Amino acid sequence: MTADLLLLQLLTGIALGSIFVLLALGLSLIFGMLTVVNFAHGAFYMVGAYVGVYLYGLTGNFWVSVVAAPLCIAAMGLITERFLIRPLYGRGIDYPLLLTFGLSYIFVEAIRMIFGLAGLPFGTPVGLRGAVNVGVGYFPYYRLFLMAFTAAITLAIWLVVERTRFGLIVRAGARDPEIVRVLGVDISRIRLIVFGIGTGLAGLAGILAAPIQAVTPEMGIPALAEAFVVTVIGGMGSLAGAVVAGLLVGIVVAMTSLFVPAMAKASVFFLMALILLIRPRGLFGQTGLMD
């Protein structure tokens, strides 16, 4: 065990955490604004991977897939919010939870019927193959790209939420939608856009994860569990918490895989239990979202 190996594993954890960050950002946006626990988030992630791989097969261009797949999933999210979730607002948190839970099964079965049970092969895109010397060893180009791309997306979301009028409305609507409505803002339209952005981020995470994991109909199941763990650790509805917790979970999984591989998947749940014992609302959680 050397310091170089530990640093390489740390970078691996950050790259893995980048996927968790994108998943948790989408989940946190949806919960923070709509107070909807989206149990279909993992299914949107899975469909995003399939749509991206399919488009890559048609065009041969990875960048087209990276742009088009999230847009397709965002469109699915818009339809889901407008026609399925919107009628359930005000009926309690259980209703959209159960609806999205059932919707996730529909998505999985639809993908199985269209693409089969075996999944789709998808290698590292041309231009992002190989490795580069980062000073402590060679690290894959694609994982470096994944880290940089996630950082750019995270910065863009932060700028939108914290520095624009739309972001101000989203933050105000998360706290008191009635007051925002009284001020003349179409809160239904804002909810629609936020849900579309949140599901689009899940689709983006899916296509970005495709080169480093198997693209199968069941890939969304562990992704959903991991996204919720990250969101709970960071604090429900907190974007800063989603980023910090996503990277933390990725590092914990990577380091556990190095020292105790058999405990890698369980380690995130131990981490969640430890964080909640110390801070029951998560690292950056705030009160009032469920009121």
Image (tube, helix red, strand yellow):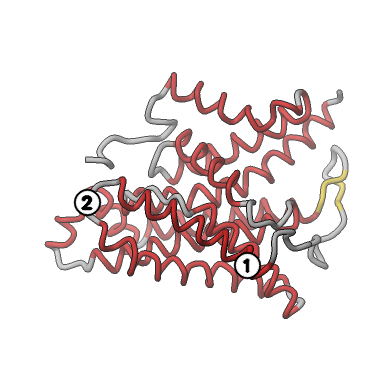
Residue in the image at 63% along x and 27% along y: 267
Where does label 1 land, which residue? 113
Q: Place residue 77 in its image quadrant.
A: bottom left
Please state which of the two labelled residues, at mark 2 or mark 1, is closer to the viewer.
1
User: Measured from the top left, where is residue 116 in percent x and y?
Assistant: 69, 64
Q: Which mark is residue 239?
A: none
- Helix, strand or loop status at disc 2: loop
Q: Which mark is residue 91?
A: 2
Q: Against 199, is 54 above or below?
A: below
Q: How many marks?
A: 2
Q: Is mark 2 in CB contact (under 8 Å) with mark 1?
A: no
Quick one: label 2 or label 1, which is nearer the N terminus? 2
- Helix, strand or loop status at disc 1: helix
Q: Decide if residue 192 is on the left or right side of residue 7.
A: left
Residue in the image at 87% along x and 40% along y: 137
Q: Place residue 159 in its image quadrant.
A: bottom left
Q: Badge 1: how crowded within 10 Å, few (<14), some, or many (20+)?
A: few
Q: Amino acid at mark 1?
A: Met
Image quadrant in which the C terminus is located: top left
Q: Decide if residue 52 is on the left or right side of residue 77.
A: right
User: Measured from the top left, where is residue 171 in percent x and y?
Assistant: 30, 52
Image quadrant in which the N terminus is located: top right
User: Measured from the top left, where is residue 105 in percent x and y?
Assistant: 51, 55
Q: Against 60, is 273 above or below?
A: above
Q: Badge 2: how crowded within 10 Å, few (<14), some, or many (20+)?
A: few
